[in-house]
Structures are given as structure tokens and as C-alpha cells.
Image (tube, grey):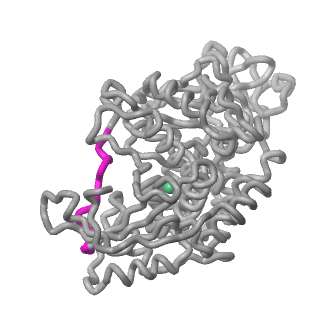
Amino acid sequence: MAKTNLFIGLLLTTGALLISPMSANAALPTCNSAASDPDADGFGWENNQSCVVATNTRSTGSKPACKSSTSDPDGDGFGWENNQSCIVSGNSTATSGKPTCISKASDPDGDGFGWENSQSCVVGTETAVEQNSSLYPYNINSPYSAMIKRCVLVTRPNDSCLMNEIPFLGMVSVTPSVDQIMDRVVVSQDWMGERFRQILSLAPSSLLVMFRYTSAIVIAGETERSYYWPVNAAIWVDPDYLWLTKAEKDTIALERQGKIDPNTGLDFNAVTLYSASGSSTDFSLSAQSNYFNNRSFNEVFFASNQVLYHELAHAADFAPLPSFANMNYAASIFDAIYTIYGDRPSYEIQTIYPNTSSTLNKIALAFDPDRNTVITDNSIDVLQVANLFWRSGAISMYSHTTIEEDFANLVASTMLKYEYNFDTNVSFYTNPDSAIPNCSDFILKWGVRNRLANPVVAQRAKWAVSQVFGPSAELDDFFANRLGEESFEQAGRNYCNN
Ligand SMILES: [Zn+2]
């Protein structure tokens, strides 16, 4: 019943994914009774399975009945009499649909409900989590500054903010501007917001348009990885993708960088790197900071583009496009996402263009440093695995961890090629025997360059980006004429020259 065991997982970027063991197509039913959720975490238990408690079952507390129905002119079920909220007889509807109070002074009786502009409003009381968080809205003049911190910190579906509090960006604009995106940014340090704005102002329009699938962007020093969170449709951007100087680097957590799972049970690993098209010089677009104290803006710009295309692809996968125009503003963000959970493109693509291999899934999970799975079958051969991978429709080994990562990686690699002509390259190499290895101890066994140009991968990628951007003559032309060729690496070289 714990939320972490269910549909709600962290969608991560370079090394990990949906932490949920639940199969992708198993949408949870709605609970028949809120009593099935005694701990009020939003998940209940009925008929021997988990269920989701609808958000409109929030308690109304112990408010007195209104003496007159005229005390409730907006007809929301809550009135105002004798300086306190009251409930109109027979009505027990919840807080759904009410705006957040602009001032706490509107709630003199402290029951959580106030009265402003001739209607009830909900007072945003800070939880302990909010009080302990270093986050704040980057733009204090944003129309969302009053509630955005609360909305991004929710962990339970029941607490998901309503769309009339913070709608999907796509409900406000189909082509969000930099200013509109920055109104949704929450940070723990000013420099994070400044750098993020600088990156957005130079980013291609294809990246900006993908923000329509989000409600908020969180950049927090304590974040050790980037992920998408479906309870509030927000993306977390690890600030390790953004810092330029040691002073900036010193304000963030760095634990995750360079982390490699030492106990996969296998004597080989796989890595995804990028190169300018046709070049043999590879570079990483992951967050890497342990080894440096200064970085160029270019390096940060391209790495952050990679992680944003990836996380926003998760957002596009979960968001209810193309239904923004018909969205019920009184519903919560989570309810909107949950409604279409079974229709996600990441799920559909597995029917149209399957990419399933239980062997590759097991190995990809072992490669993922955020999981502790170990392969016990020591007969697995690197070249057999590489061959299996090459014949699959995935752009990287990480794509084999979950269907969500498969989808997000296809979109991100396509956009990096489309906008910057970066090739996605995948290499399998042997793990060094030495405890303190150097570059010569990593021996390449098999590698593919410009993986996107593989016809099976390209077909899937074309379908994936069509789900994010809709019909596009430019993308059609890209897939017809600009993919280039897939090629293979010479086995045996080491990593000293790369
Ligand atoms: Zn991911």
C-alpha cells in the first residue's frame, strides 16, 4: 500500500527509472470507499488489490452547519457566518475547486477555509516538509508564487494541487515563453534560476514547447538526480547540470556523480556517449562534476538540453495531451494524469513497435547504479548481449530498464540529433580487473555509432516524437533525409584516447 510500491515512481534520467515494480499496463482502480485508505496516503486496499482514493474525498472537518443557504453565494457548499466557515446543509463536498486564499487573515477562525472576493478559499498552511525545504519561487511576482512550493513538495496523490491552482503550462499557452516557464521555477539558490533562464533563452523552440506538459520545474541543491514526478507533473532538474564555477558547485549535493554499480555480477558494462556527427570524439551529456571545478557554458548548455528533453519526454508521456482544451480545472493534476495512465505513448509503442527482452531488461537493471540487482548467471557473454541489444529497437541499454525510459530516450536522442546533429553512440566494454583502474583497463568489445540511424530504432523514434510534437513536416524531413548511417566500432581499443 505504500506509495513507493505503486504507480508513483521516480522517473530518472541517466541511470535509473521508474522505481515501481508494478507492471506498466496495470492502472489502479478508484477506491469505492475512502475508508479503504486509513493512513490517508491516497492509496487504499480493496478486493485484494490497491486502489486510488479520489482526491475529492478530503475531509471537511468539523464545521458548523450554515443557518442560511444565502451564506454560500458561490454554491460551493461552504458558507461564511459569524466569522467562520460553515457547511451548507446536506453538502459535504471537499476543498476541490476552491482558490487558495491570498491572505491568511481571511481565515480568522483558523479552520483552513477563508473568505475572499465573495467566495470560500483554502488557506495554504505550511507543512513540516515545506518549512524544512530550502525551496522558494524564483520569480516572487509569478501568479503561482503563493502555492507553487506547496504544489511541488506534495508526495501523496490526495495532496496533488488542483489545475485551477497551477494548471499545466500547456493550458495557459501552447507555445510557452521563457517568462511563462520561469514563472513555474522553484529553486534553492538564485544562481540556479539565473542559469536556467540563460539556457532557456538560447534553447531551440522544440525544447520550450515541451514545457507545456509540466506544471513546475524544481532545481534544488539537495537533488542528486533529475526526475519527473507524476503527482504534480513537475520535473526535478539536478543542478549538477547547471553549475559553472566552484562556488556554484559547492552549493549542491554531488553524491551521485560518477557512480557505477560495482556489483552487477557481470564482467562488462555499456555506456551511452554522444559525438558531433561523423566525429570519433565522444563526450558525455551526463551530470559530471567530481573531477572539475570550472566548466564552460557550452558544456552545461548541451548537457542540460539532454536532461530537459529526457525529463520533458516523461512529462509528455504522462500528460493528458491532446485534452488540455477540455480539461476540468477543478480536478487535481494527479487525477488528470491518472485518467489517461493506460493511454501513455510509452505503453502504446510497445504494442505498435515492441521492444521487450527479459534478458536485456535484467542486464539493464543490473547496470543501473540506483538499483541493487545482481546477475547470477555467469554464462552471459558480452557479444551475445551486444547482438541482442543491436537487434532490439532501443537507442541505449538504459532504455531496457522500463518502457518509460525507452520512450524518453528515443525522444531525447532524436531531438539532440535534430537540433544539434549529435550522434548517440553505445559501447560495450569489459570491466577492469584492477581495483584502481585507469583508462587502458577498459577494453571495447562492441560499439555502435549513430544508433538512431538504425531503421528499427528510427521507426520507433519517429513515432515517439510524433506523440510529443504532433504532425511535423520538419521532423518527417529529418527522418527521411538527415539521419545519416549507423556504423560500428573497432573492437579492442581502450578509453585512453577518448
Ligand atoms: Zn528517465
Query: Which of 392/302 is in front?
Result: 302
50 is higher (above) or lower (below) than 202:
below
Query: Which of 77/339 is in front?
Result: 339
Residue sitting at x 68%, y 21%:
114
Residue sitting at x 33%, y 31%:
294
Query: Which of 329/437 is in front?
Result: 437
Q: Quadrant of residue 142?
A: top right
Left or right? Give the position of 240 relative to 60. Answer: left
Residue sitting at x 56%, y 28%:
197
Q: Which portion, as a residue range, is magenta?
A: 254-267
Query: Which of 469/16 is in front?
Result: 469
Where is residue 490? Give x, y as percent: 36, 73
Q: Quadrant of residue 97?
A: top right
Residue 59 makes an appearance in the image: no
Where is residue 246? Give x, y as percent: 31, 28
Q: Quadrant of residue 447?
A: bottom left
247 is higher (above) or lower (below) than 7:
above
Q: Quick one: quadrant of the C terminus?
A: bottom left
Left or right? Give the position of 173 relative to 134. Answer: right
Residue 351 makes an appearance in the image: yes
Residue sitting at x 46%, y 63%:
425
Outermost residue toward the bottom in this view: 379
Magenta segment includes 96:
no
Left or right? Give the position of 349 relative to 265. Answer: right
